[in-house]
Image (cartoon, rainbow, N blue to C red):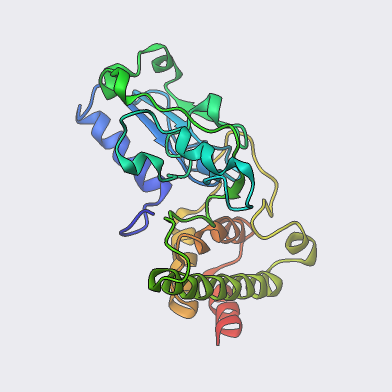
């Protein structure tokens, strides 16, 4: 999972504009893998900074992580290991989500294109180097989709081992944490949004999606909303950040920081 400070979409785009103006790169290709990854560049990335971006999903769509078959005792268990190319390092047999996905392998979300689409005609090797034969990867066609905001990289351990017991405890703690985040965000939404908006689904679009426009109208409001929540309710981890859209919609609806402070205090005290 990503580590470090949160990177906001508007700040990323401003850095790209600055680097382009300073001739810090000639052409750039980005692949963004995240739930609702299209929202990072949709309506924000101009087409005149020589950046071509592919996202794993649309602005309002989950991106689905793909995990090793075998979790349901089916006969598919061996396929994930068979999919690793001959002579590959052992870690190729570890499921890495949809890190290696390309459009033809991504069938549970919509791969999108943004920015300078003319770069789409260039060969990938110009940016990534040649594709040597022993670097080819194949994928199992038997996959089970999960929301990537809920997923994590795991490895099998022996049954009954200390590692398994520790992993089970971490899993219980994580599930309890997620239930608590869901409860807090749900209560805040009920305090600040109308019943109709809450019923629309906290992780979906509360306000109408505007084609080709960014998700956030006021980025300073959005940043202050996240800071206020974390000050009152604790840090949002990878899982909790799926509710960023709710915070953005609150700003777009005219809800201010003082209102969120009040609601967060009631929900998290």
Direction from residue 132 to residue 167 in the image, left or right: right
Direction from residue 189 to residue 12 in the image, left or right: left
Residue 81 is at least partly visible in this image = yes
Residue 131 is at least partly visible in this image = no
Residue 187 picture location, percent across and down: 66, 75
Residue 7 picture location, percent across and down: 36, 52
Direction from residue 210 to residue 241 in the image, left or right: left
Q: Nearer the viewer, residue 137 or 174?
A: 137
Q: State whether residue 122 is above or below residue 172.
A: above
Q: State whether residue 113 is above or below residue 158.
A: above
Residue at 55% across, 24% down: 104
Q: Nearer the viewer, residue 246 or 91?
A: 91
Q: Nearer the viewer, residue 191 or 244?
A: 244
Residue 118 picture location, percent across and down: 42, 14
Q: Quadrant of residue 196?
A: bottom right
How many numbered callouts? 0
Q: State whether residue 92 is above or below residue 153.
A: above
Looking at the image, the residue that sits furthest to the bottom is 269
Residue 86 picture location, percent across and down: 36, 28
């Amino acid at each position: 999972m990503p580590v470090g400070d949160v990177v906001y979409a508007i700040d990323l785009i401003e850095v790209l504009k600055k680097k382009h103006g300073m001739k810090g790169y000639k052409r750039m290709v980005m692949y963004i893998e995240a739930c609702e990854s299209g929202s990072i560049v949709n309506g924000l990335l101009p087409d005149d900074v020589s950046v071509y971006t592919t996202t794993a999903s649309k602005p309002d769509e989950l991106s689905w992580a793909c995990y090793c078959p075998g979790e349901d005792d089916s006969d598919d268990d061996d396929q994930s290991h068979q999919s690793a190319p001959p002579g590959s390092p052992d870690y190729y047999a570890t499921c890495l989500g949809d890190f290696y996905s390309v459009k033809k392998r991504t069938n549970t979300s919509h791969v999108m294109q943004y920015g300078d689409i003319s770069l789409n005609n260039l060969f990938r090797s110009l940016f990534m180097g040649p594709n040597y034969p022993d670097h080819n990867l194949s994928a199992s066609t038997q996959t089970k989709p999960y929301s990537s905001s809920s997923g994590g990289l795991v490895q099998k351990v022996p049954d009954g081992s200390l590692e398994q017991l520790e992993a089970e405890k971490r899993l219980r703690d994580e599930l309890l944490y997620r239930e608590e985040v869901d409860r807090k965000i749900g209560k805040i939404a009920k305090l600040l949004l109308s019943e109709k908006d809450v019923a629309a689904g906290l992780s979906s679009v509360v306000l109408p999606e505007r084609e080709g426009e960014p998700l956030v109208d006021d980025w300073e409001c959005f940043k202050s909303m996240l800071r206020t929540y974390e000050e009152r309710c604790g840090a949002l981890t990878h899982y909790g950040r799926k509710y960023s859209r709710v915070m953005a919609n609150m700003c777009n609806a005219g809800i201010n920081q003082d209102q969120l402070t009040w609601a967060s205090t009631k929900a998290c005290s």
